[in-house]
Amino acid sequence: MKTRTHRDLCPDDLCPLLVFKHRLIHALDQEIPDDREWPGDGYYWCQETCYEVGPDDEIAHPSTCRSGRSCHGGFRT
């Protein structure tokens, strides 16, 4: 059985502004020993706001920071 990595758990349309430890330290290819559902260690924040909430006042998480969200990739002026 192939071991999974954090990269395997990232949705294809994940917002590039969603930050978590494994993205910061370039460890997306680190193997995951357990049966977690989302990448990282559970702490996520938006690079645009520097908080756990995005610029649209919604939670920053891999399940929500996807292409359908209004702030995906950053607000454009």
Image (tube, rainbow, N blue to C red):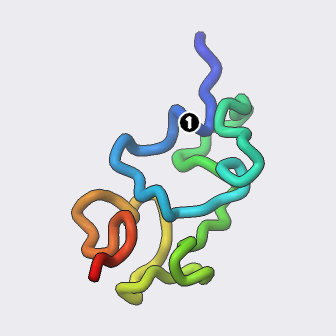
**Secondary-structure class at tag 1:** helix
Please say if 47 is above or below 49: above
On the image, the x and y values in percent for residue 13 come to 34, 48
Q: Quadrant of the C terminus?
A: bottom left
Query: Which residue is pictured at 33% across the width and 74% down the height?
Result: 71
Query: In the rendered view, does 69 fall on the left or right side of 54?
Result: left
Query: Which residue is pictured at 40% across the width and 89% down the height?
Result: 57
Query: Which residue is pictured at 60% across the width and 83% down the height?
Result: 51
Please say if 73 is above or below 48: above
Q: Nearer the viewer, residue 2 or 72?
A: 72
Hey, which quadrant is residue 24 in on the image? bottom right
Spot the residue most to the top: 1
* Location of mark 1 (residue): 7
On the image, the x and y values in percent for residue 69 come to 27, 69
Q: Nearer the viewer, residue 75 or 62?
A: 75
On the image, the x and y values in percent for residue 48 come to 51, 77
Please say if 6 is above or below 60: above
Q: Nearer the viewer, residue 63 or 35?
A: 63
Spot the residue most to the bottom: 57
The amino acid type of the residue labelled 1 equals Arg
Query: In the rendered view, does 70 fall on the left or right side of 59?
Result: left
Query: In the rendered view, does 6 fall on the left or right side of 67?
Result: right
Q: Quadrant of the N terminus?
A: top right
Query: Which residue is pictured at 49% across the width and 72% down the height?
Result: 60
